[in-house]
Image (cartoon, grey):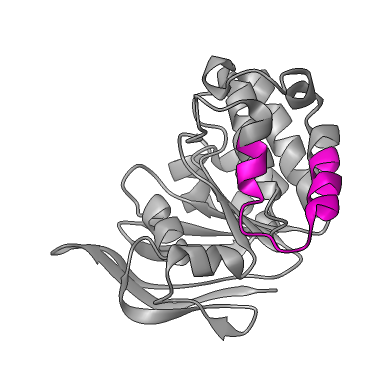
C-alpha cells in the first residue's frame, strides 16, 4: 500500500513547521527524507501518524485518508514507527517490549508467535537477551528492540526516524542491512535520516527537506549526482 502526502501544512501552536509537503512512498519501496536539524523531518513523521495535526492538505495510505485520524487508528491501518530515540520500555523485558508491539492485533496468538520467531531470527541478539530488561541493553540492542517491536504489528509500511543516531559505525552498517532485510520481506520503508550517504545507498528514491519545504527529490542516482545535495549532505 502506498503513502501520499499532498499539500501538507502543519504547525506547533502558532509556529508553522511544514509548508505544503508533497511526497509519496510506494508499497514496494524504500524512500528517504533528508535534511539538517530542524528541517521538519521528525515533524513529517508525527504528521503521518497523527500526533501532529494538519492545518491543510491530506495524507492517504492505501487509497484511504488517514489525516485527522487518531494515532491508534493510523497504526491499525498498517503503519508502524520506530521513533527517534528508540523509546523502548526500560522496565519491561525484551519479550514484553516485543509483545506490546503486537498489541491490538486480532489474528490470534499463533500468528503473533510466528512473527515473534521471525523477529528473533532477524535479531538473534534479542533472543539471547529475551528476559533482560530493556533499559539494560546497549544502544544498538535497544535500536534492534525498537525495530523489532514495530515489526510485531506486522506493518505494510515502516516509518524509521533517525535509526542510526548515536550508534557506532559498525552498528550503523548493521541497521541499514536490517532495513534491506525488512524490505526484502515485503515491508515498505520510509526513512528519515541525517546520514545521507547511507540513506541514499539503501533507498530507491529520496526527498530533501529544508525549513519545512521539499527542495529536491529524485532517484537515488539523481540525488547522489546532484551538486547541491553532495555539498550540503555528502561532504563533497
The quarter of the rendered structure image containing the N terminus is bottom right
Where, by quadrant of the figure, is residue 226 drawn? bottom right
Q: Is residue 69 visible?
A: yes
- In the image, is residue 198 above or below residue 105? above
Q: Residue at x 51, y 35 (%)?
A: 86
Q: Residue at the far left: name it.
A: 14
Main SS class of the magenta portion in the image: helix
Left or right: residue 39 compared with residue 235? left
Left or right: residue 44 compared with residue 108? left
Q: Is residue 193 magenta?
A: no
Where, by quadrant of the figure, is residue 138 drawn? top right
Q: Residue at x 62, y 50 (%)?
A: 224
| Of the pair 134 and 49, the residue shown nearer to us | 134
| Of the pair 200 and 77, the residue shown nearer to us | 77
Q: Residue at the far front: name it.
A: 109
| Coordinates of residue 135 in the picture (x, y in percent) | 52, 20
- In the image, is residue 11 above or below residue 68? above
- In the image, is residue 119 above or below residue 91? below
| Of the pair 190 and 67, the residue shown nearer to us | 67
Left or right: residue 22 compared with residue 158? left
Where, by quadrant of the figure, is residue 121 drawn? top right
In magenta, the rendered stretch is: 97-118
| Coordinates of residue 186 in the picture (x, y in percent) | 82, 59
Q: Is residue 108 magenta?
A: yes
Q: Residue at x 78, y 18 (%)?
A: 128
| Coordinates of residue 228 in the picture (x, y in percent) | 47, 52
Q: Is residue 172 visible?
A: no
Amino acid at each position: 500500500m502506498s503513502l501520499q502526502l499532498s499539500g501538507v501544512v502543519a504547525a506547533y501552536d502558532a509556529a508553522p513547521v511544514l509548508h505544503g509537503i508533497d511526497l509519496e512512498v510506494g508499497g514496494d519501496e524504500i524512500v528517504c527524507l533528508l535534511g539538517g536539524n530542524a528541517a521538519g523531518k521528525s515533524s513529517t513523521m508525527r504528521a503521518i501518524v497523527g500526533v501532529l495535526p494538519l492545518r491543510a492538505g491530506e495524507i492517504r495510505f492505501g487509497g484511504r485518508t488517514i489525516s485527522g485520524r487518531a494515532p491508534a487508528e493510523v497504526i491499525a491501518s498498517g503503519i508502524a514507527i520506530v521513533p527517534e530515540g528508540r523509546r523502548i520500555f526500560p522496565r519491561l523485558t525484551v519479550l514484553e517490549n516485543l509483545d506490546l508491539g503486537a498489541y491490538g492485533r486480532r489474528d490470534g496468538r499463533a500468528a503473533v508467535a510466528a512473527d515473534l520467531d521471525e523477529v528473533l531470527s532477524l535479531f538473534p541478539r534479542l533472543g539471547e537477551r529475551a528476559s533482560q530488561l530493556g533499559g539494560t541493553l546497549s544502544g544498538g540492542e535497544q535500536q534492534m528492540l525498537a525495530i523489532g517491536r514495530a515489526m510485531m504489528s506486522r506493518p505494510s509500511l515502516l516509518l524509521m526516524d533517525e535509526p542510526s543516531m548515536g550508534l557506532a559505525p559498525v552498528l550503523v552498517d548493521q541497521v541499514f542491512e536490517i532495513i534491506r532485510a525488512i524490505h526484502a520481506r515485503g515491508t515498505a520503508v520510509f526513512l528519515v535520516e541525517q546520514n545521507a550517504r547511507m540513506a541514499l545507498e539503501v533507498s530507491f528514491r529520496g526527498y530533501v527537506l529544508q525549513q519545512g519545504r521539499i527542495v529536491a527529490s529524485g532517484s537515488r542516482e539523481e540525488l547522489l549526482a546532484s551538486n547541491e545535495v553532495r555539498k550540503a549532505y555528502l561532504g563533497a
